[in-house]
Amino acid sequence: MNLSGRAALVTGASQGIGRACALRLAKDGAAVAVAARNQEKLNVLANEITAAGGKAAAFPVDVGDEERVKAVLKAAIAQFGKIDILVNNAGITRDQLVMRMKRADWDAVLSTNLTSAYLCIQQAVPSMLKQRWGRIINITSVFGQMGQAGQANYAASKAGLIGLTMAIAREVGSRSITCNAVAPGFIETAMTSVLSDEFKQNAVKMIPLGRVGTPEDVANAVAFLASEEAAYITGHVLNVNGGMLMG
């Protein structure tokens, strides 16, 4: 999967799935703009990519800030000349039972997980339309497909990403731009590291492959959807969940 000559932007790239996606896309030859709130972690990642012979640039951003998102996409396009591949990965959780959930926690999760994807797509699509080629990849979740108690905000945001994926796929398909989603299951990241051992053990029992996934498992799926080999796939949700949810 050769991505030489392509330019990618990955949100939430400072750690976990986003970091793994940036490293994999760079390994496959893409120049990568890495975006997240943590400038220090972004610099470490960009340096790691360039040290391995790749091209990378770090752009600090809070994806909930519309004006900052616009500025970062503009700066990334100015630096690389275009954005061919957009990976909307930024995500947060603010878990609570719905009866106790504060409106601020609902709004924060929807803004970071869903609205930010719309903002990034809106800014990246003109570059893709101009060259009649593009790959938009939204990182959703198995819980956007099956729900999860205590995560009404998170599940709603991730389900929304699936609807957004299909709508965008229909809007831009005639210009050879694809839009797909990757739905990870239980992945070992900083977000899941705070969960209890008991919860993790019970989760593994629900996974036919018998193990928790890695960020690299998700990055491999993203790299495929970003490639020329996936040119005839659009509006699709690719499950990376070890069999946790099938069908």
Image (cartoon, helix red, strand yellow):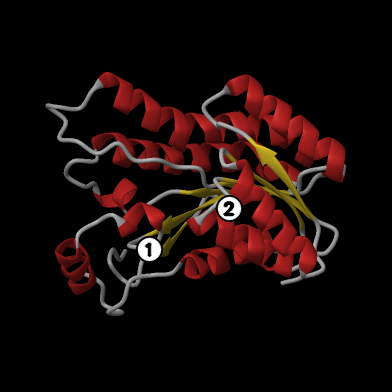
The disc labelled 2 sits on which kind of residue?
Answer: Thr
Taking the view exactly as shown, the residue that stands out farthest to the front is: 40
Q: Position of residue 185 (x, y in %)?
A: 35, 61
The disc labelled 1 sits on which kind of residue?
Answer: Ile
Q: Is residue 10 left or right of residue 189?
A: right
* Label disc, if present, on residue 121 of the rendered structure: none
Q: Quadrant of the N terminus?
A: bottom right
Q: Is residue 166 left or right of residue 177?
A: left
Q: Residue at x 77, y 70 (%)?
A: 52
Q: Position of residue 162 (x, y in %)?
A: 43, 44
Q: Residues within 10 Å of mark 1 (few under 14, many from 20)?
A: many
Label 2 and label 1: CA atoms lie apart by 24 Å
Q: Position of residue 19 (x, y in %)?
A: 57, 57
Residue that label 1 marks: 187
Closer to the N terminus: mark 2 or mark 1? 1
Instruction: Identify the secondary structure beneath mark 2.
Output: loop
Closer to the camera, 105 or 25? 105
Q: Residue at x 52, y 69 (%)?
A: 216
Residue that label 2 marks: 234
Taking the view exactly as shown, the residue that stands out farthest to the left is: 99
